[in-house]
Image (spheres, grey):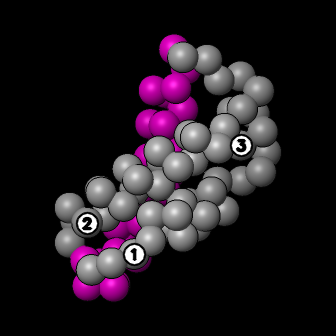
């Protein structure tokens, strides 16, 4: 299964509301990063896993894609 991490990162970023992103950007510090990404994971990963499953990917594919998307997202903060 091949899904562009960049394309998927855009989907993840759209799933997180603009207010949430702005709030997170304004308050993020190195110690807050873990909590921030845990919140994103808890709110979005199930949708990611369902999407990847629908595309005939595995749970491991979903984890890999989600991790790549989070890295891209973090780089854009």
Q: Identify whether 32 is placed above or below 19.
A: above
Q: Identify whether 54 is placed above or below 69.
A: below
- Between 41 and 29, the one nearer to me in the picture: 29
How would you rate the neighbour count of disc 1 (Cα within 10 Å): few for under 14, some for 14-19, many for 20 or more? few
| Rendered location of residue 75, percent (x, y) | 58, 40
- Numbered badge on residue 33: none
- Numbered badge on residue 61: 2
- Numbered badge on residue 3: 1
- In what quadrant of the picture does the C terminus appear? top right
Q: Earlier in the sequence, mark 3 or mark 1?
A: 1
In this view, the residue farthest toward the bottom is 55
Q: Which residue is mark 3?
A: 21
Magenta span of residues:
31-57
Does the residue at mark 2 contact the one at mark 1 (Cβ under 8 Å)? yes
Between the C-alphas of marks 3 and 1, the distance is: 24 Å
Q: Is residue 18 magenta?
A: no
Does the residue at mark 3 contact the one at mark 1 (Cβ under 8 Å)? no
């Amino acid at each position: 299964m091949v899904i562009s991490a960049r394309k998927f990162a855009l989907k993840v970023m759209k799933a997180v509301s603009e207010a949430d992103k702005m709030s997170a950007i304004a308050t993020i510090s190195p110690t807050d990063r873990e909590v921030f990404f845990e919140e994103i994971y808890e709110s979005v990963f199930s949708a990611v896993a369902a999407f990847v499953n629908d595309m005939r990917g595995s749970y491991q594919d979903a984890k890999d894609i989600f991790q790549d998307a989070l890295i891209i997202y973090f780089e854009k903060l």
